Image (tube, helix red, strand yellow):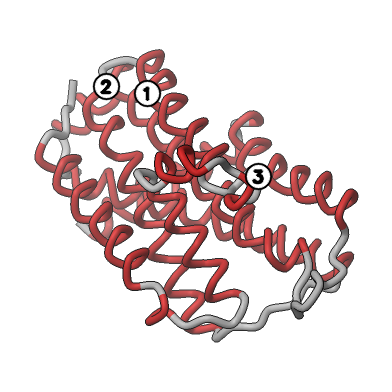
Amino acid sequence: MIRSTAAVTKWEFILFLREPSAFFFTMVFPLLMMLLFSSMWGNEPFPGEAYGYVDFSVPAFMGMVMATGGIMSLTTSIAAYREKGILKRFRATPVSPAAILIGQFASVLAVTVAGVVLLLAVGFAFYSLHFMGNIFEFVLAFLLSACSISAMGFIPASLVSTARSGVVAANILYFPMLFLSGAALPWFMLPDFLKKVSLVFPLTHAIKLMQGVWLGGSLSDYPVQLAVLAGFVVIGLFVSIRHFRWV
């Protein structure tokens, strides 16, 4: 299984690099969003705080990278493989559904890390980005968040039959999360009703967790977010493995 998982990861990463639209929306679009809003608000510390807009928002743009890879790319690619019969061919090999799902996640995680590194490089180089937390705790928060978002993407990816339905399912999940979670706009700007609605999305909790730890908080300060994200991981993996379809 290890060998087959590594092979799936390798080829999925290569295929991603060959897909201009996936590369743009995962790697470039979040960076452009950060540059756009940062050009308006800069990174001067907020009144009474030690951090500015870029410091506060970088974890949110990391969440945007996660959602683009874990929802859009992952869902549509697996659905396309199912429609083209590629998964059916895999079925005749020793490659298991777990190997396919893990390989897909590993390639998405690699792309996500690359996108985050690009965000951080620009933030530190041009906006004097500040990190105020514990690096080990932030890495744990980042990994849990990435696992949770991808686990949510695995659910429709394991159920839909065609690439078109995969795109529809991905859009239904992606765009509400993008605008209600705090990834595109600060969460505190939402009306109270939409704040309550946003709590059903794992990305909302991922951004809250990463922002809190980035700005000096501890993982222990966010038990609700940790529980929700872990719950999405368990549910997503259970549904995707239980109901994975080769055709």
- Front-lying residue, 236 or 202: 202
Residue that carries the numbered disc 2 in the rendered image: 160
Q: Quadrant of residue 126?
A: bottom right
Name above or below for residue 54 compared with residue 235.
below
In this picture, residue 189 sits left or right of residue 70: right
Crowd class of label 3 (few under 14; some 14 to 19; many from 20; radius 10 Å): some
Q: Helix, strand, or loop for circle 1?
A: helix
For image coordinates 40% across by 55% down, the residue present is 106
- Residue type marked 1: Ala
- Residue type marked 3: Leu
Residue 185: give its label: 3
- Front-lying residue, 114 or 47: 47
Q: Alpha carbon of mark 2 to alpha carbon of mark 1: how far?
A: 8 Å
Say whether residue 11 is visible: no
Contact, mark 3 vs mark 2 (Cβ under 8 Å): no
Residue that carries the numbered disc 1 in the rendered image: 169
- Residue type marked 2: Val
In this picture, residue 226 sits left or right of residue 180: left
For image coordinates 60% across by 55% down, the residue present is 60
